[in-house]
Amino acid sequence: MIKNLYRFVIAQVRHFIIVGTVLSLWVWNGCETKRESPFSFHVYSVIDTSSATIGDVLHCQVWAKGAGKRIIEFPGFVVDNPDISLGEKRTLESDYSDNYGMEFEITFWDTGSFTLPAYPVNVMSITGDSVEYAIFTDPIGVTVHTVIKDSQPELRDIKPPVPLPMILPLRLIISLMLIFILMGVLLWLWRKRIPARRKEKREIYIPSKPPYEIAVEKLKKLHEVNVSTPSQIKVFYTELSYIIREFLEYQYFVRAIEMTTEEIFHSKSYLPLNGSLMDRLLSVLKRADLAKFARFQPDRNQCLSDLKSMEDLVIRCRLEWFPAETKAYRMEAV
């Protein structure tokens, strides 16, 4: 008996599930898909009121109901009357899938009786690229009344002339002036934070001894330098080149220390040396450059010869100085 009862309950549950599923599908299909209209195909237009006042916005609706499989097109509403203006239009929806509608906004700007012309609803071909035929709605009559309710209105006074605004935008000018003032203040504060640049005074170095004596003392010390190894030869020519350049700079006020040998050659017009002395000077300076930068290694005899040659050049180019407390007299050759 229990087994039979169990089978009965199972059968009822299955039946309930099947019926519920069918009802759910039917309700779902009915909610998602609109039914076609039960009416025959017809076209009509309607307006929300046939009596209005100047400036009222009326809504005129055009419907094509029961179109079935037909393709419907709503062209623009054409009204050949300057006292009637058309506004926006919008598409209307219906409970049925084959009902189509369009709404137009219409405004009247004069009193009297107006007739809205018949509106054509186009039925398109199956492909939708041509019009098979058009169905026209009935014309609609509208009466427009004045907004003045007084039977004997009085004319109002003419309004006084409106003053013209200022040609110059005063507010803009004031804003720009304030912006420029603010920028000037910010620039002044920024400049104030930067310390003022002090004028650098160029220091003039005046040697304690004449250039001739300084060069002779340094050249005598250079005799004590050993020139037996490549590194010692490099040091020797480095010192010799510097002593001669220093002598030329202090003696003739030419920046010989900072100049290359090539630059000294091009500046020979500023040095009161004859041709032989200039050739001797350039020869020693070039040999010194090779020893310093190209690992050139002249022998000991060449080093001593260059040293004696530069000593002779210093002696022959000697100038005697006559220093004073506040100024120096013109240098004279000994």
Image (tube, helix red, strand yellow):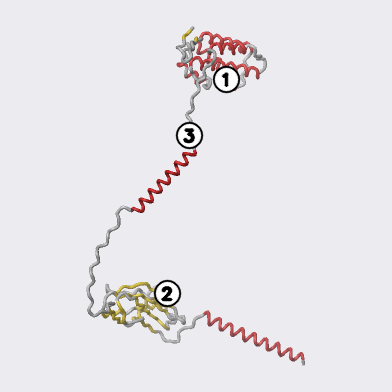
Front tag of 1 and 3 = 3
Q: Which residue is mark 1?
A: 289
Comes first in the chain, label 2 or label 1: 2
Residue type of the residue flagged with mark 1: Asp
Whole-angstrom CA distance, mark 1 to mark 3, is: 44 Å
Q: Earlier in the sequence, mark 2 or mark 3?
A: 2
> Residue 213, located in which quarter of the rendered image?
top right
- Helix, strand, or loop for circle 3? loop
Give how far apart the Cα atoms at labels 2 and 1 are: 97 Å
Quadrant location of the N terminus in the rendered image? bottom right
Instruction: Provide residue 66's location: percent of width, then percent of height.
Output: 42, 83
Q: Secondary structure at mark 2?
A: loop
- The residue lying at 31 percent from left, 74 percent from top is 55
As drawn, the label of residue 127 is 2
| 133 and 276: which is toward the camera | 276
Residue type, numbered disc 3:
Ala
* Mark 2–mark 1 CB contact (< 8 Å): no
Please rate how many residues cluster around mark 2, counting C-alpha atoms within 10 Å: few if below 14, some from 14 to 19, many from 20: few
Q: Earlier in the sequence, mark 1 or mark 3?
A: 3
- Viewer-side residue, 84 vs 109: 109
